[in-house]
Image: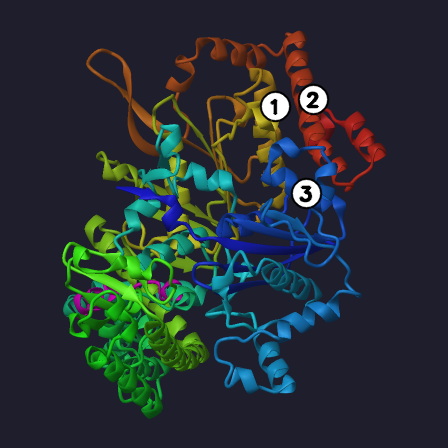
């Protein structure tokens, strides 16, 4: 199905503040009017793992930066556009030096000055002026009460966060004319429908390369230049799991996929909810919930449209229907016995069904105030009759005036056109007001008598009638306009009070909507699990990954897939797995399958495996599979491989899952063997307690023999067999050990390895390999040094000393 990105993608304004290795952020969604906050967290140079994670999750349309470090600002520019490398002048281009000078209309990037001391007071004042959801009587709330409430919502003790949020509010205020719909009334009060706290500390880190390698999302764009905004979803994990019944469910699924979590409580809530949905006795209840969810819309977006143009009939109907369905789902969830819905989102939704529920109050207000039929007819906000007696009297008077307009007498000046006043009558048209019309033919009117006078003017004529406007008509129109203005003003007062009431109680409604969207996702997970026979994984803090008969969730959708078993634990000491097998035997698919299963477990989804699937709680997933190549990067594919490996080595922990596919193939085979061997040695020397979970595929058969530390290394291969034509074929079954057929496919490689290891009396061969090893290690060190030096982390003397000492012997013994 083709989708127009312009209509589906959300616009976010992201404000980031970084200083001394810490980052804080806040972003505002222009469609949903939700404010997201990211509290201070450590994010070190040069990789900015958390910053990259924020960029990928938010995908900002507008960016506001603030930092005391020009190096950080330059690196962010390079991150956004690799062609900006080394161009320090661009920083000055985007800097905003005074209030009101923001260049949002010219560029999507603005850089605000950074000052921890002097700017704090003004930014805090902006924050304390916010009207947040849940704030009772915000318009009359005292400053002290307002500060207490806002301090309970925002971490106002974090200076970087205050600067980030304050800059975001300043940016919005300076661009008021561009985004009027996010402000309420003439006071320019920012409309905030919900405040969401994004906790980065509990998220599993994945870089962009890993997302691309694992096909989490796969957008196929139209090849024609004039249809670049049109895309369709390819084969991806998102496409597989998206059986949601509502648009907010599909959007929440994207958020879940972008934010895998290591919060055990959250994961167990999702698993328990999926199990509840899969039980046969709950099938009818699930179908009822799905029916109610199908009527859901994004209430934040609908409310924004209502505020912006007072709402069309469909907007009011959609909003009211969503509120009604939300209340119905809460009532349904509350009807289940607690012992059957413990530790599920069903229980959380049921807890909102209580006396004084805000949703019921909003629903009651909509029933009593909004006249949907009149809105559809008059195309503006109309208050129901019976709500306000004064308003009803004014409307009745105006309606009587209009209905009795035929009793009004035309001006005596009309006799200049025809002696009979009975030939004229007063008519009212809402578009043009009061007119005097006649059915007489144009020839029967003495038009020459009004040529030199302004008293009577012809407005328009048809085949059957002619319509005039006289001074009396203008007087009646003034009376009508005055009464109509009074009515509209009074209705607008009621509208503002209704919006204010909804806004004050919107936090609970938004939270229910969020839970319903998440429930929609979990029902979709349950359907996929039932269809594809997935099982519930056991997330444990123990260091083990045990997957029995695991399958690749995407590949099995298009062809028969042979399951494989993976067992890694402290007893076996096989944290580093080297898979050596021929081409097209399934090595890459196998390692991606492991990563996808672990990833699915960390989004709270069942996994394609047999029972007793144990997955350790991961901190991050890194891959060296996909190599992003671009002429703008000004670097070779091999250099990109080295940079990816450098980031993996620097950022990985004992809770990281690492996939390395054919590392070293982009250079000479001797350099490739040396680099791969050095990488494995580095991880092995971390020891049993600190080594990550590593899966490596390679075509270098004897790399294991080069290793000095083999305690944590396990060799795997894929079985092959000869077919009827005496050609080797893969069985796609993973086994421990080495497949001898790997070397037979590469006779030249076999010859080289044989000369190196079996003819040790030839010192020249050994010296050749030793030189290649040392040279490659030096190259690897220089790649990392180049990155570190540029970030001012080390000195030239330090690197020079390391470089001079590197050799095959002393490097492995460092």
In this figure, what is the number of numbered marks?
A: 3
What is the magenta range?
Answer: 285-302
Estimate the x, y position of residue 209 in percent, counting from the top left.
50, 38
Give above or below for 503 relative to 442.
Answer: below
Q: Name the residue rendered at 40%, 62% in the picture.
A: 267
Q: Dot 1 corresponds to which residue?
A: 674
As helix, strand or loop, the secondary structure at mark 1 comes to helix
- Along the line of sight, which residue is nearer the eye, 536 or 782? 782
> Between marks 1 and 2, how big is the CA–CA gap?
8 Å
Q: Secondary structure at mark 3?
A: loop
Q: Residue at x 24, y 63 (%)?
A: 467
User: Residue 163 in the image: x percent, y percent?
Assistant: 68, 63
| Label of residue 774 in the image | 2
**Left/right of residue 45 with respect to residue 697 in the rendered view:** right
| 360 within the magenta span | no
Q: Nearer the viewer, residue 415 or 554?
A: 415
Residue 46 badge: 3
């Amino acid at each position: 199905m083709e989708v127009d990105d312009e209509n589906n993608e959300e616009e976010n304004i992201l404000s980031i503040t970084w200083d001394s290795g810490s980052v804080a952020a806040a972003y505002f969604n222009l469609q949903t009017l939700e404010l997201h906050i990211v509290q201070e967290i450590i994010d070190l140079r040069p990789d900015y793992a958390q910053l990259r994670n924020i960029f990928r999750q938010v995908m900002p349309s507008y960016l506001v930066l603030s930092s005391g470090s020009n190096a950080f600002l330059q690196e962010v520019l390079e991150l956004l556009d690799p062609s900006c490398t080394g161009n320090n002048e661009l920083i000055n281009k985007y800097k905003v030096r005074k209030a009101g000078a923001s260049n949002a209309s010219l560029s999507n990037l603005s850089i605000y000055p950074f000052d921890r001391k002097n700017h704090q007071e003004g930014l805090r004042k902006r924050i304390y002026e916010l009207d947040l959801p849940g704030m009772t009587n915000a318009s009359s709330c005292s400053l002290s009460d307002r500060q207490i409430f806002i301090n309970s919502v925002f971490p106002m003790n974090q200076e970087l966060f205050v600067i980030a949020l304050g800059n975001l509010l300043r940016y919005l205020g300076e661009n008021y004319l561009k985004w009027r719909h996010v402000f309420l009334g003439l006071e320019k009060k920012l409309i905030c429908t919900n405040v969401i706290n994004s906790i980065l500390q509990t998220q599993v880190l994945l870089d962009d390369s890993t997302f691309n390698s694992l096909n989490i999302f796969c957008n196929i764009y139209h090849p024609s230049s004039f249809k670049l905004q049109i895309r369709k979803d390819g084969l991806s994990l998102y496409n597989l799991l998206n059986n949601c019944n509502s648009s907010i469910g599909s959007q929440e699924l994207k958020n879940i996929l972008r934010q895998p979590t290591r919060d055990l409580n959250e994961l167990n809530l999702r698993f328990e909810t999926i199990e509840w949905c899969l039980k046969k006795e709950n099938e009818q209840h699930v179908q009822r919930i799905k029916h109610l969810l199908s009527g859901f819309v994004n209430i934040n977006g609908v409310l924004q449209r209502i505020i912006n143009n007072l709402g069309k009939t469909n907007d009011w109907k959609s909003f009211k229907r969503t509120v009604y369905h939300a209340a119905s789902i809460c009532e349904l969830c509350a009807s289940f016995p607690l012992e059957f819905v413990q530790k599920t989102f069903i229980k959380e939704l049921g807890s909102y069904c209580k006396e004084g529920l805000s949703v019921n109050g909003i629903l009651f207000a909509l029933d009593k105030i909004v006249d949907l039929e009149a809105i559809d007819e008059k195309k503006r906000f109309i208050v129901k009759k019976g709500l306000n007696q004064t308003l009803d009297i004014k409307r009745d008077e105006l309606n009587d005036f209009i209905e009795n307009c035929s009793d009004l007498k035309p001006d005596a000046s009309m006799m200049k056109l025809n002696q009979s006043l009975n030939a004229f009558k007063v008519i009212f048209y809402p578009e043009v007001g009061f007119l005097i019309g006649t059915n007489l033919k144009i020839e029967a009117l003495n038009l020459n008598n009004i040529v030199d006078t302004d008293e009577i003017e012809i407005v328009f004529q048809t085949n059957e009638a002619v319509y005039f406007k006289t001074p009396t008509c203008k007087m009646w129109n003034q009376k009508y306009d005055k009464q109509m203005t009074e009515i509209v003003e009074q209705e607008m007062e009621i509208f503002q009070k209704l919006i204010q009431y909804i806004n004050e109680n919107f936090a609970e409604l938004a939270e229910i909507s969020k839970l319903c969207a998440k429930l929609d996702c979990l029902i979709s997970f349950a359907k996929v699990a039932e269809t594809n026979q997935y099982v519930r994984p056991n997330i444990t803090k123990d260091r083990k990954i045990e997957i029995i008969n695991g399958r690749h969730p995407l590949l099995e959708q298009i062809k028969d897939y042979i399951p494989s078993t993976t067992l890694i634990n402290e007893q076996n000491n096989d944290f580093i797995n080297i898979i050596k097998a021929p081409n097209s035997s399934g090595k890459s698919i196998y390692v991606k399958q492991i990563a996808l299963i672990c990833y699915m477990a960390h989004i709270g989804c069942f996994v394609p495996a047999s029972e007793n699937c144990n997955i350790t709680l991961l901190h991050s997933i890194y891959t060296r599979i996909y190599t992003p190549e671009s002429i703008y990067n000004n670097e070779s594919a091999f250099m990109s491989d080295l940079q990816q490996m450098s980031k993996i080595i620097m950022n990985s922990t004992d809770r990281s899952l690492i996939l390395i596919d054919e590392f070293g193939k982009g250079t000479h085979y001797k350099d490739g063997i040396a680099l791969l061997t050095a990488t494995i040695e580095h991880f092995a020397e971390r020891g049993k307690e600190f080594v990550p979970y590593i899966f490596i595929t390679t075509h270098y058969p004897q790399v294991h023999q080069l290793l000095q530390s083999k305690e944590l290394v396990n060799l795997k291969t894929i079985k092959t067999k000869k077919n009827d034509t005496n050609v080797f074929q893969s069985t796609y079954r993973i086994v421990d050990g080495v497949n001898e057929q790997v070397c037979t496919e590469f006779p030249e490689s076999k010859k080289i390895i044989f000369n190196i290891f079996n003819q040790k009396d030839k010192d020249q061969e050994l010296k050749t390999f030793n030189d290649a090893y040392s040279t490659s290690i030096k190259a690897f060190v220089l790649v990392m040094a180049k990155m570190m030096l540029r970030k001012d982390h080390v000195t030239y003397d330090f690197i020079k000393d390391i470089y001079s000492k590197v050799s095959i012997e002393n490097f492995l013994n460092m």
